[in-house]
Amino acid sequence: MCPRRPGDATAVYASTDKAEKELGWKAKYGIEEMCRDLWNWTSKNPWGYQGKH
C-alpha cells in the first residue's frame, strides 16, 4: 500500500442490500473470503494474467 493521495476517499463503504432487495441477488461470499481469495491469487500471480515481463 502507499500513502493516501490528495483527493482520495478517506473511507469507502458498500452494501449488497439494494441488489438483494431489487434484483433478488445475494452475494455468495463475504468480504473476508473475497479479500483472502484476492490476496492468494495476487500472491501466486504477481504479474496478473499477462505472466512475467
Image (cartoon, grey):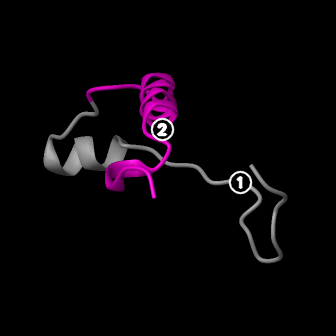
- State left or right for residue 4 relative to residue 30: right
For residue 10, which quarter of the picture? bottom right
Residue drawn 79% across and 55% down?
Answer: 2
Residue 11 image label: 1
Residue drawn 34% across and 56% down?
Answer: 50
> Which residue is nearer to you in this view: 18 or 13?
13
Q: Residue furthest left?
A: 24
- Residue that carries the numbered disc 2 in the rendered image: 42
Q: Residue furthest bottom?
A: 7
Q: Residue furthest front?
A: 53
- State left or right for residue 1 relative to residue 28: right
Residue 34 on the magenta span? yes
Magenta extent: 28-53
For residue 6, which quarter of the picture? bottom right
Q: Position of residue 12 (x, y in %)?
A: 63, 54
- State left or right for residue 1 relative to residue 50: right
The span from disc 2 to disc 1 (Cα, nearest Å) is: 23 Å
Residue 40 on the magenta span? yes
Tell me which secondary structure the magenta stretch mostly adopts. Answer: helix
Residue 40 image label: none
> Which residue is nearer to you in this view: 2 or 31?
2
Compared with residue 17, is residue 11 higher up or lower down, i.e. above or below?
A: below
Q: Position of residue 14 (x, y in %)?
A: 50, 48
Q: Position of residue 41 (x, y in %)?
A: 42, 33
Give neighbour class at mark 2: few <14, some 14-19, many 20+ (Cα, 10 Å). few
| Quadrant in which the C terminus is drawn | bottom left
Three-letter residue code for mark 1: Ala
- State left or right for residue 3 relative to residue 26: right
The kind of secondary structure element at disc 1 is loop
Q: Nearer the viewer, mark 2 or mark 1?
A: 2
